[in-house]
Image: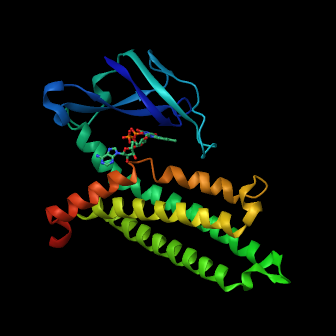
Amino acid sequence: MLNGVKRWITNAGVSEFYTVMAVTDAEKRAKGISAFVVEKSDEGVSFGAPEKKLGIKGSPTREVYLDNVRIPADRMIGAEGTGFETAMKTLDHTRVTIAAQAVGVAQGALDYALGYAKERQQFGKPIADFQGLQFLLADMGMKVEAARQMTYAAAGRSERGDADLTFFGAAAKCFASDVAMEVTTNAVQVLGGYGYTREYPVERMMRDAKITQIYEGTNQVQRIVMARQLLSGVQSEL
Ligand SMILES: Cc1cc2nc3c(=O)[nH]c(=O)nc-3n(C[C@H](O)[C@H](O)[C@H](O)COP(=O)(O)OP(=O)(O)OC[C@H]3O[C@@H](n4cnc5c(N)ncnc54)[C@H](O)[C@@H]3O)c2cc1C
């Protein structure tokens, strides 16, 4: 019987299937957590109101309530007590997808800023002619490309299941999302006052970039993961 609430669930109420990590033996702490598949139609499953968010407004986020949800034994994923391990292993792979999301948002903002800089005239010439802006655009392009290459490097490790995936997944997610935040903020800068309005897409990209620094583990948590990997010697042994 599953009971509890989980906040911040993407696609809650839309998805048919939910992976739920539940405590099955409180005394065993991390080894007392098991993973289950819960279906939207299971009796006792309900959802909260949609969260009013800063960005990613096209992605619904709601609470999931489990109220005496009885599910058959074969809906346990893996053996009892392996839920935490499953969750951690899953994050190694899914963090790469957040890195990719961040690269996409950053690339979109860079593309828009480049086009705008060539069109917008000030002091009798396109603002793209000003070296101060060129240096900003160059840094944006350089960082987006570095984030993309790191994401590809992590994705390759995810495909192969390499031993250093934990480091690379965290590093790619952390780096790419920090780049996305910086690049989208600078894209708003390139558009000047227009960048700050909803008539242009870069303010939305800036708001959408922010979540990539937060979900799938905040970037503080990614740095904890990376430091542990480095200090445990996993990286240097490879
Ligand atoms: C839009 C959205 C969608 C989401 N979708 C999902 C989903 O589908 N499934 C799901 O399970 N979760 C989802 N989440 C949850 C998300 O993963 C968490 O919000 C995130 O991991 C941060 O956890 P928290 O909100 O509890 O922040 P907290 O843990 O309260 O963190 C608050 C601050 O403290 C810092 N902090 C916390 N611990 C440490 C530490 N040890 N060292 C240094 N700093 C620390 C954090 O970095 C952060 O800056 C979603 C969240 C949002 C906002």
Give the left or right position of residue 118, taking residue 86 as reference.
Answer: right
Quarter occupied by residue 171: bottom left
Residue 98 lies, in percent from the top left, at 46, 55
Residue 198 lies, in percent from the top left, at 75, 52
Looking at the image, the residue that sits furthest to the right is 124
Viewer-nearest residue: 41 or 68: 68
Looking at the image, the residue that sits furthest to the front is 123
- Count how many numbered circles sit on residues in the image: 0
Quarter occupied by residue 125: bottom right
Residue 159 lies, in percent from the top left, at 35, 63
Q: Quadrant of ligand 1?
A: top left
Viewer-nearest residue: 105 or 190: 190
Viewer-nearest residue: 217 or 194: 194
Give the left or right position of residue 39, taking residue 106 as reference.
Answer: left
**Placement of the C terminus among the 4 image quadrants:** bottom left
Q: Which residue is at 61% across, 56% downward?
A: 206
**Placement of the N terminus among the 4 image quadrants:** top left
Q: Which residue is at 83% across, 81% downward?
A: 123
Image height check: is 129 above or below 9?
below
Residue 81 lies, in percent from the top left, at 19, 33
Viewer-nearest residue: 98 or 142: 142
